[in-house]
Image: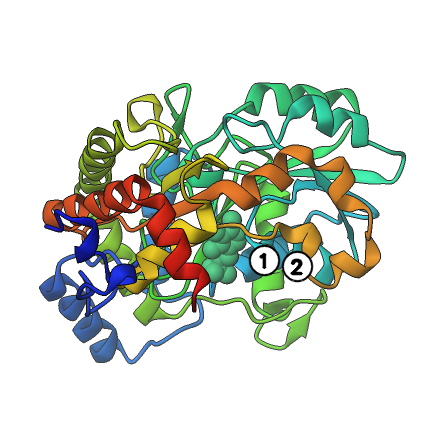
Amino acid sequence: MKAHARDLAVLGGAPAFPGLLHVGRPNLGNRDELHRRIDELWERRWLTNDGELVRELEQRLCDYTGARHCVATSNGTAALDILVRAAGLTGEVILPSFTFVGTAHALAWSGLEPVFCDVDPTTHTLDPGRVEELVSDRTSAILGVHLWGAAHFVDELRSVATRHSLALFFDAAHAFGARYKGQPVGRLGDAEVFSFHATKIVNSFEGGAITTDDDALAARLRLLRNFGFEDYDRVVDLGTNAKMSEASAAMGLTSLDALDHFLAANARNLVRYRHRLADVAGVRVVSPDPREGANGHYVVLEVDPGPGLTRDELQQALWKEGVLARRYFYPGCHAHEPYATRHADAARHLPVTEKLVSRVLCLPTGTAVTEGDIDEVCAILALAQASADVVRRQLGRR
Ligand SMILES: *Cc1c(COP(=O)(O)O)cnc(C)c1O
């Protein structure tokens, strides 16, 4: 472990992780179980189109979440795409800007207008009071995001939705395995959307799913997932291709089998990060707490603006060590195209988001990160902050 400022890569030392330590390095389940499932689908010669493994995964996801229906998809964005169409949303949809850009794109892609709402400074999720201020006569839905693998303010958002007769959906891409007031994420909104991308807590290489208790919505989602085909040669709706393959379902099931192991690793890692960073000036671990239902999959730092290193300076010092810490979700959806051009003054209405995009840094976690890795990352952060002036001067010299 690095013990002196001169060991820091930014000051000429050898990088701590020449092999690179990524945020979102995939969790892997049991390799033999994956191979067994792949052998089975091989024997069946059934590779996609509502296969046995996809159905098994959907059933397992219903069992886990308690939702009546689950529709598995090729990825989380395709799931959002077919959800907003199946639900017949129109006009404006209120969502946070502090999210992955795919959340906003899914709305804009269907011709809806994303209306960016500010977030709560503590949870980083939609502020229900601000949501209500943004409701107009064109609003058809609220799309919350269970950021950092935790659900917050669901009851308050439900009240706003009910008062204004709006649909309430959640982008739960981060949040498989999380709970809200003891209830699993999956039936908190009128529908919830999961991503099983390789970087998420549970993965199917690429994949996603929508869970809902709404029979009619689920039926339409199934149609839209497969071009609108009602049977072999009758098309009754404007669908797309959002189907999950059997190979993805094989991985999804294998990953799901190991969920408890993944949750435990995340909780353990988070405790260790908190402990090791407790005395490091200027940085705070603000991840939601697994003991309160979070899945622990995101180690989120808020970096104070000074007198230590800024978020961007700390990130640069970490990258020199091979620690690819990420600025999620810089610079906020409102500052990405096509939204930046359409809403040139959006930042004025998003003061909390603007602050967070300059201060938040996500660190590596998951089963691919060891306790030793965490100790090293934290030692680097401590040394860099303790020698902030020297490090800053060196970074400025490049
Ligand atoms: C990953 C992610 C998505 C997109 O999911 P994909 O499966 O990659 O399409 C959407 N929203 C959020 C918040 C995400 O983190």
- Residue at image position (77%, 20%) is 163
- Residue 95 locus on image (x, y percent): 67, 41
CB of mark 1 near ligand 1 (< 8 Å): yes
Q: Which residue is mark 1?
A: 102
Residue 63 lies in quadrant: top left
Residue 229 lies in quadrant: bottom right
Q: Which residue is mark 2?
A: 105
- Residue at image position (49%, 33%) is 187
- Decide: few, some or many residues near mark 1? Use Cα within 10 Å; few <14, some 14-19, many ≥20: some
Q: How many labels were placed on the picture?
A: 2
Tag 1: residue type? Gly
Q: Residue at the right extreme?
A: 137
- Decide: few, some or many residues near mark 2? Use Cα within 10 Å; few <14, some 14-19, many ≥20: many
Residue 353 visible at all: yes
Along the horizontal axis of the image, is 292 left or right of 208? left
- Residue at image position (17%, 56%) is 7
Q: State if disc 2 and disc 1 touch (CB < 8 Å).
A: yes
From what the image shows, is residue 223 above or below residue 140? below
Along the horizontal axis of the image, is 294 left or right of 114? left
**Of the pair 167 and 384, the residue shown nearer to us:** 384
